[in-house]
């Protein structure tokens, strides 16, 4: 997946070179400032499935809901300037509730590697909840701002199994399209 995006990602990340750490022979990285957010626009199918199951989804502060979807603030990030591998950390999360059953998914981390995914803190464990498809992503850059739009998010098997067990259903399945994510971050200033 990342290979298809390689040239575009490399151009976008290298354009942020003033914010990249310098040094001969050292790996160059782009550090993200604690500004910006990742927004997840739920697919109509995911929203309909939750509604039909009577499951309410609500943001956990400082995340918030808006017209464009659920917005999760970026707290930090570090990406390799050549390969774009790295992590983007977030605050807040989402709560899924039906009757007395509540599942809180917090402190998301977007992992950009050979198998991009989004993990969440669930209780005391960190769990991969979404697989991320970057093949149709669009990248744009303006100053120190980097935006990656059109990232498709689908449910992992682990998350589907856990949600089915928690809510007593078989409605969740691996590969269920959850929505589309847009990451809008800002490179930190060099010190």
Image (spheres, rainbow, N blue to C red):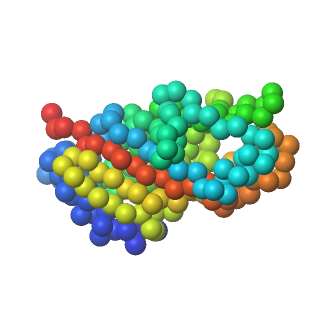
Pinpoint residue 55: horizontal percent, then vertical percent: 74, 40
Pinpoint residue 47: horizontal percent, then vertical percent: 66, 50
Image height check: is 151 above or below 73? below
Does residue 8 appear in the picture of this structure? yes
> Would you identify the image quadrant in which residue 32 lies?
top left
Pinpoint residue 107: horizontal percent, then vertical percent: 52, 34
Image height check: is 13 above or below 188? below
Q: Nearer the viewer, residue 131 or 21?
A: 131
Q: As drawn, is 129 to the left or to the right of 8? A: right
Q: As drawn, is 4 to the left or to the right of 66? A: left
> Would you identify the image quadrant in which residue 33 lies?
top left
Total numbered circles: 0
Residue drawn at x 57%, y 39% is: 120
Q: Quadrant of the C terminus?
A: top left
Residue drawn at x 60%, y 56% is: 43
Pinpoint residue 80: horizontal percent, then vertical percent: 31, 53
């Amino acid at each position: 997946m990342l290979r298809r995006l390689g040239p575009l990602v490399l151009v976008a990340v290298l354009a942020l070179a003033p914010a990249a750490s310098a040094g001969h022979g050292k790996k160059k990285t782009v550090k993200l400032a604690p500004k910006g957010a990742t927004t997840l626009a739920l697919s109509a199918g995911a929203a309909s499935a939750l509604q039909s199951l009577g499951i309410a989804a609500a943001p956990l502060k400082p995340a918030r809901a808006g017209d464009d979807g659920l917005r999760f603030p970026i707290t930090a990030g570090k990406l390799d300037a050549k390969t774009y591998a790295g992590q983007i950390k977030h605050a807040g999360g989402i709560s899924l509730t039906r009757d007395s059953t509540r599942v809180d998914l917090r402190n998301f981390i977007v992992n950009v590697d050979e198998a991009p995914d989004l993990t969440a803190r669930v209780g005391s464990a960190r769990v991969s909840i979404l697989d991320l498809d970057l093949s149709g992503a669009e990248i744009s850059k303006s100053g120190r701002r980097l935006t990656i739009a059109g990232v498709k998010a689908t449910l992992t098997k682990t998350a589907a199994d856990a949600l089915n067990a928690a809510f007593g259903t078989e409605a969740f399945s691996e590969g269920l399209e959850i929505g589309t994510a847009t990451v809008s971050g800002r490179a930190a200033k060099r010190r």
